[in-house]
Amino acid sequence: MKPIAATQSGLLLPPFERSLVEDTAVLVPVVYQNGSYKCKKTEERKGNYTEFLRHDLNVSRLTDIERHLWWAGMRKAARPLHRQVMMDRHVVVTEQADLHLTWRGPRIYIKPLPKYLLNVDFWNKSICSDSGDSELYESAKGFLLSYIWLVFNESDFQMAIDNSNHPRLLPEGITYRQWTGFIADFMNGDDFDHMDQINPRYRFGELRLNRLNTIYRIKYGRKHFVRGYFYGYHEYGTFMEQNFAWIVTFFAYVAIVLTAMQVGLATKQLVDNDAFHDASYGFTVFSIASPLVATVVIGFILFVTAADHIMKASKHEQNNKRPQKQAGVDSGLSMDRDGMGV
């Protein structure tokens, strides 16, 4: 993220007045992985967390396709946690802000609320600083707004702090009374539809991952054709199951139609019907050819996917390969994510 001009007033202020988490708590991790999956210190200089914050709250991949987001989600608040449970959705914790409130099938990805976003002093020193990075400010405020959506009933609060199906989503030590007070402080008389200084991503609630993948493949073509927005597969079997399970249903339907045609040809009403004979002939040829075509297409996709993985792995190795004599002293450890994930 690159800093952009400050707001028109030239002054950025914390969106709440009272801290829920005190300075004595550990507000940020010691290290983090940047976009290249390299470990970096969170604190660049004493009290300077700018690069970490830009990484931790980065939703630029979504703001880049803002005008297309209507196809992946609606401009409305996300459903609260108890509604997610009612819809049989399983919460999967992610630390990527640009995966926060995205979903696929029974899974919805949610990023836990960082402690630093609940501390006024941290906002003043690191987010509302003189540099006036309004993009960072809008991302931070938008992320807080997403938790107002998710947690406002007491049942939502209990699910966020004590749920056996996923790690806690809210920092430890907060009571429901404190949380409701924080919501009132944060909203400060505004409503959801007219809050200003919000990152455009947070004008939308939940976003469908499959459609985000399609948007990225169409918009960026070759660059994201294989992986789309979020790949998320660690085995080829999972990839096949998620993308080609419909083929089984298709061929089951073909088998039913062929059986029906055989029965039809045996009836006196259709035995001399030339149009039905032509249709049966055409569909028979189609049913023979379609499995062959499907096999070739699937094989080609798997080949392209494997080639893409190999090329990316080779490029990563070349970019991160260091002279052996420096390997023992260089602490910039590159950590590649496992398998075929993002």
Image (cartoon, helix red, strand yellow):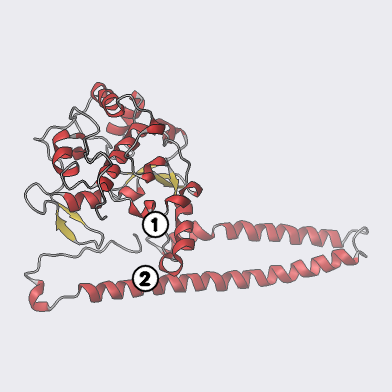
Q: How many discs mark residues in the rendered view?
A: 2
Tag of residue 309:
2
Comparing 71 with 331, the one in front is 71
Residue at image coords 23%, 47%: 133
Q: Does 205 appear above or below 223?
A: above
Please provide percent x and percent y for residue 124.
15, 38
Please provide percent x and percent y for residue 132.
21, 46
- Residue count near mark 1 (Cα–Cα under 10 Å), binned few <14, some 14–19, many ≥20: some
| Amino acid type, callout 1 | Phe
Give the secondary structure at mark 2. Answer: helix
Comparing 174 with 125, the one in front is 125
Give the secondary structure at mark 1. Answer: loop
**How far is the residue under mark 1 from the one under mark 2?**
14 Å
Q: Does 153 appear above or below 56?
A: above
* Residue 184 in which image quadrant: top left
| Amino acid type, callout 2 | His
Horizontally, residue 110 falls left or right of residue 213, namely left
Tag of residue 230:
1
> Given this view, does label 1 or label 2 mark the residue nearer the observer?
1
Residue at image coords 21%, 57%: 33
Please provide percent x and percent y for residue 30.
12, 50
The C terminus sits in image quarter: bottom left
Residue at image coords 24%, 52%: 3
Horizontally, residue 87 falls left or right of residue 195, namely right
